[in-house]
Image: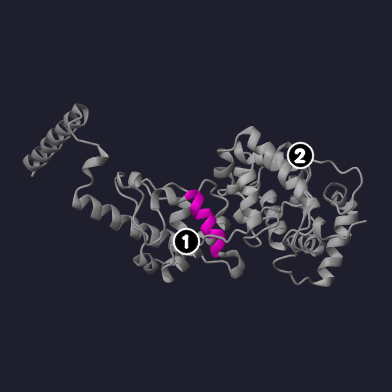
Amino acid sequence: MLLTWKRALIACCVLGILGTVVLVSGVIPVNASSGHWQITRWLLNFASDRSVSFHSRGTKPPEDSGLMDARLGAEIYEINCRFCHGLPGQEQPPVAKGMTPTPPRLDRSLLEKKPRELHYIIQHGIKFAGMPAWPVPTRSDEIWPVVAYLQQALKENREDFDAERSDSDLAAVAALPVLQTCVDCHGVDGVSRAGKQVPHLTGQTEAYLRQSLLSFRSSERTSGVMMPVCHALTNQEIDALSKHYHKSASTNLPARLETEVADQAAVDRGRELAMNGDRGRKIPSCQKCHGPDAENRREEYPNLAGQSRWYLQQQLKLFEKRARGGAQTARLMHPIADKLSEQERSDLATFYASLPRPDERPEK
């Protein structure tokens, strides 16, 4: 018995020495051009599928179908995913084909995966596969539109979800090419075209818009959608976009794409808190910084009137979790958000969503 253990120990030592020699010599190729062995590919795929299935348990799509907007998902996919995967149902781009492993072809077989599994893969990425994690782990809400887009595109065999651009859109993009990256979500006029998750830019000051774009570019403000877009913007382009969307507030803009049904009692409660605050809990008035119709309001603060209820409530949640970020002034919201109950966040969001956007107000 002792002899057997000695032989096993010697064998382990020999294998360890051989492994070390092979590792140090560099004879094992790591070049992507050779690809994986078939057994390696199978093991990685099998382990990946089992892991995703296990760890995605408990993840559920949002009950609000408006948070799974395939059109918004198409725009996000274009920014973050197309370079490696191409369009659903098509071959990968040439450069991505040189990766090991090659990014999977997004064909109808992908429909076999559950929505929670797709969400998990996009949010967390895949080790040893070149699949990156979502740029902002705390913004899982940004991923559901991509899941909706993939499922709808594959079911309908659609190559793309390109938004229709009017002649005025094309003319604006021709005059200011950097709008190319903004128009399908924010429109030329600053009014959201991609659902409640996209804020209206109309009515915002030039200073606030510039500050927001700079914060996204520096990753001080977190968004897996906006950070990649702003990362490529120059200071001159940020200035041009800020001026454009600020000036768009004075033009004749279209009416809301969707009118949110407001609970009048919630509107009244939200108005009371927004206009007067709560001295006992040291909650200041929202109106002094965010309107409506506040005098001497600082230009670095956003105008909240007419934003979607979901968007406003989400921002307050992100402030409470310290997951929103932004410029130095954004930190002023942390102690305020900490004191607001979920009901109060909802009431404030309902109140501001019930107000007309600046472009919808009659001229004085």
Q: Residue at x 54, y 55 (%)?
A: 75
Question: Is disc 1 in contact with disc 2, using a CB cutoff of under 8 Å?
Answer: no
The answer to which of 285 and 99 lies nearer the viewer is 99
The reply, left or right, for residue 128 in relation to residue 318 is left
Q: Is residue 44 above or below residue 326?
A: below
The part of the chain drawn in magenta is 70-80
Query: Is residue 55 part of the magenta span, yes or no?
Result: no
Q: Residue at x 25, y 37 (%)?
A: 31
Q: Which residue is mark 2?
A: 207
Q: Which residue is mark 1?
A: 160
At mark 2, the secondary structure is helix
Residue 143 at least partly seen: no
Mark 2 is on which residue type?
Ala
Q: Residue at x 85, y 65 (%)?
A: 269
Count of number-bearing discs: 2
Q: Quadrant of the N terminus?
A: top left
Mark 1 is on which residue type?
Asp
